[in-house]
Image (spheres, rainbow, N blue to C red):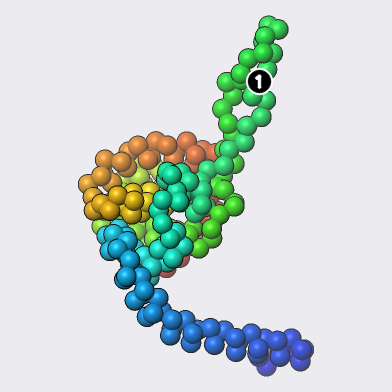
Amino acid sequence: MSKIPQAGVRRRAELLYQQLDGLQALRRNVRPEFLAESRNHKAAKLLRQIPCIGPMRAARLIALMQTPHRFRSKRQLWSYSGLGIETHDSAQFRFVGGQLQRSKKPPQLRGLNQNHNHEMKEIFKSTATRASCGTGPCHDFYAALLAQGMKPEMARLTLARKIAAITLTLWKRGARFDAQQLKTQAARASNRTQVISQVFMPRWWPIGSCDTH
């Protein structure tokens, strides 16, 4: 604080730090209650089957999603979580020999959707980052993508989308996590995402710590 010469700016900074200290104390007090409430939901045990989704991430998913039936398909969850692919299409029709025909030009990929729930995106991003640094079936899925030539950023994106899809499926069906399915799906996921990687590279993936929550 002594390095701030302006008295008004220094005072505002002091008040902001006081507010931060109060929020951190409140966070420590609320965390046990938050986790205890999440244990009252059957979904908590289902979601914790997924590698790298611990008690806190499971509780946050339950609080944010409330019910998996809000999402008809995994693509809706991807869009809600900021993992959906945006496309742009123009000149869908053109005149050929005096006849109006649909153009065969494919839609242009514009990247990930910007209108989304930022907390949901952070959950799946951090889960994928943790899984890529650790061991287990999700890391094996990530390593298989890298072995096929996919760039690390795109591999983490693919893993985040896969974790989101697994989350929705397990919660909807009340099923058990099957690690064997990840091995068989790695090749198909690689082929799809390689096409995307040729158009854009996601820059929204900072290098984060491999913590578990």
Which of 78/194 is in front? 78
> Who is closer to the viewer here, 68 or 192?
68
Image spot of residue 19 (x, y percent): 60, 86
Is 70 on the left or on the right of 18, as rendered? left
The kind of secondary structure element at disc 1 is strand
x and y percent of residue 203 in the render? 55, 53
Residue at horizontal 57 percent and vertical 20 percent from the top: 104
- Of residue 82 and residue 202, the one placed in the foreground of this image is 82
Q: Is residue 30 above or below residue 96?
A: below
The answer to whether residue 52 of the structure is visible from this angle is no
> Is 1 displayed left or right of 171 in the figure?
right
The N terminus, quarter of image: bottom right
Task: Please give the residue where the numbered disc 1 appears in the rendered image.
Answer: 93
Q: Residues within 10 Å of mark 1 (few under 14, many from 20)?
A: few
**Residue type beneath disc 1:** Phe
x and y percentages locating residue 84 in the rendered image: 51, 46
Residue in view at x 39 percent, y 61 percent: 127
Callout count: 1
Q: Is residue 91 visible?
A: yes
Q: Is residue 189 above or below residue 13?
A: above
Q: Position of residue 43 (x, y in %)?
A: 32, 61
Above-or-below relation of 156 to 28: above
Task: State the residue at coordinates (65%, 90%).
Answer: 14
Left or right of residue 23: residue 158: left
Q: Residue at x 59, y 51 (%)?
A: 114
Q: Quadrant of the C terminus?
A: bottom left
